Amino acid sequence: MHALLDRLTRFLESGVALGPRGLVVLAAALLIPVYLFPLWQLTMFAPQYPDGLRLQIYSYKLDGGNRGQDVKEVNVLNHYIGMPALTTEAFTEFKWIPFVVGAVALLCLRAAALGKMSMLVDVTMLYVYFALFSLWSFAYKLYSYGHNLAPEAAVKVPPFMPPMFGYRKIANFEIYSYPGAASYALGGAFVVLLAALALGWRQSRPRAAGR
C-alpha cells in the first residue's frame, strides 16, 4: 500500500508534457459551443401538431421552434393539465451552468499553462462531478414538472416524467428527447481530458522508473 501511495504521489507531482497540454487546451476549446448551441432538444408530435413543437434547452435560456412561439404553445397546453409554465426564470440551472463551464475552461488552461499532473486530475474530477450533477438536476426538473400538477387543472392526467433520452408517448403526444450539439461538445471535452490523463500517465512511467 505504501509503495502504491508513493507511486501515486510521484504521478500527481509530475509535470505534463506538451502532448497532454495540447489536449487540455483542446478540451477547453470544446467548451465554447456550450454558449452557442442547445444542450438538449425535445420535440413533441400530436394529431393537432403534425409538424411538432420544439423546445431547445441552452446553458443559459429556454428557447423554442417557430421563433420561440412553440414555448408559448407548450405552456398553453401545460396550463390545462396543471403543469407550471416553462420559463427561463424558472430554471436556476441557467444561472450557474455558464459560470461553471467557464470556470472549468479556465482551470483547463491553468493546468495546460502550469503543466502539473495534479491540476489535470483535479479539473477532470471536477468535470465528472459537474456532468453528473447537471444530469441529475435535469432529471429532477423533468420529474418535478410532471409530478407537481395543480389539482384544480381542467384536464386530469396521471403524473408523468418526460423522457431524458429517446422516445415516450404521453397522452396523445409523442415526445422525443435528445442531446444537442453543446452536449456532444461537452462529451468530447471529457474524452479529450481522459486522453490527456492517459497520455500523461504513460509519459510519467519512464521518468518514475528511472528514479
Image (cartoon, rainbow, N blue to C red):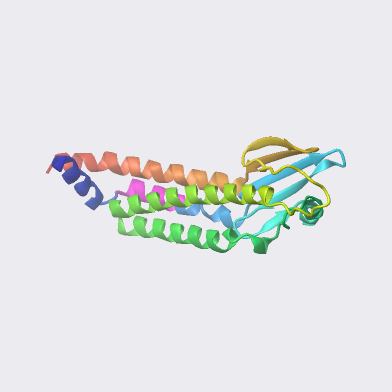
Residue nearest the viewer, comparing 98 with 36: 98
* Residue occupying the point 54% across, 47% down: 185
Indicate left or right for 22 with 171 as reference: left
Q: Residue furthest front?
A: 151
- Residue 40 sits inside the magenta stretch: no
Indicate left or right for 194 with 84 as reference: left
* Residue occupying the point 76% across, 42% down: 44
Residue nearest the viewer, comparing 39 with 78: 78
Quadrant in the picture for residue 69: bottom right
Report x, y in % for residue 53: 78, 46
* Residue occupying the point 57% across, 47% down: 183
Report x, y in % for residue 164: 62, 42
Residue bounds of the magenta highlight: 17-27
Residue 155 seen: yes
Report x, y in % for residue 80: 81, 52
Report x, y in % for residue 120: 34, 51
Magenta segment main secondary structure: helix
* Residue occupying the point 58% across, 49% down: 140
Q: Residue furthest right?
A: 48
Quadrant in the picture for residue 106: bottom left
In which quadrant will I find the C terminus? top left
